Amino acid sequence: MRVRQVGLKKGTIPHAINVPFTKLNSKALAKDPIAVSEILTERFGVKDMDGVLNYNNAKTLYLFCNGSWCGQSPSAIRALLTMGYPQSKIKYYRGGMNDWKLLGLTTK
């Protein structure tokens, strides 16, 4: 599972699933924790056990932004950790799309 945090108009990493930054960050979590929980359960394999989130089958997430200067993925990571998402299942590609493209890696 790969999570793209920015709305890039010029391609993305193949198989990435876009989760807009505005839907998954600390501000979104404070405003509407149920909506954030729904993202976790509908997209990331988290189970809602009567209001308690079970992360046993949670997917490993790979977050990335436009580049190392972008703070959106780190903000999303903080929100995920606040919700109890296992740190071991969160990966962060710091170079983002900028480095991905500079390295000549495949985009879609």
Image (cartoon, rainbow, N blue to C red):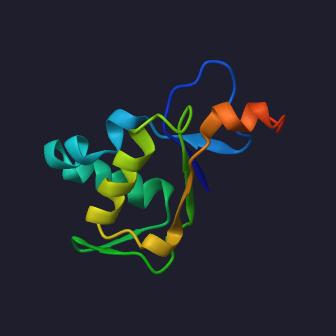
For image coordinates 71% across by 45% down, the residue present is 15
- Residue located at (49% from left, 54% from top): 43
Q: Is residue 67 above or below residue 54?
A: above
Query: How many callouts does the rendering have?
Result: 0
Q: Position of residue 85 (x, y in %)?
A: 38, 68
Q: Position of residue 73 (x, y in %)?
A: 44, 45
Q: Give the farthest residue toward the bottom.
A: 56
Residue 13: quadrant of the picture:
top right
Q: Quadrant of the C terminus?
A: top right
Residue 62, image x and y in percent? 58, 55
Is 46 or 80 nearer to us in this picture?
80
Task: Answer above or below: position of 2 versus 27.
Answer: below
Residue 68 position within the rendered picture, expressed as x and y whole percent measured from the top left: 53, 39
**48 or 68: nearer the viewer:** 68
For the point 40% across and 39% down, the residue is 71
Please indicate, yes or no, whether residue 63 appears anywhere in the rendered image: yes
Give the residue furthest to the left. Answer: 31
Furthest residue in direction top, as rendered: 9
Can residue 108 be seen by looking at this rendering?
A: no
Determine the image quadrant of residue 8: top right
**Residue at 61%, 56% in the rendered image:** 1
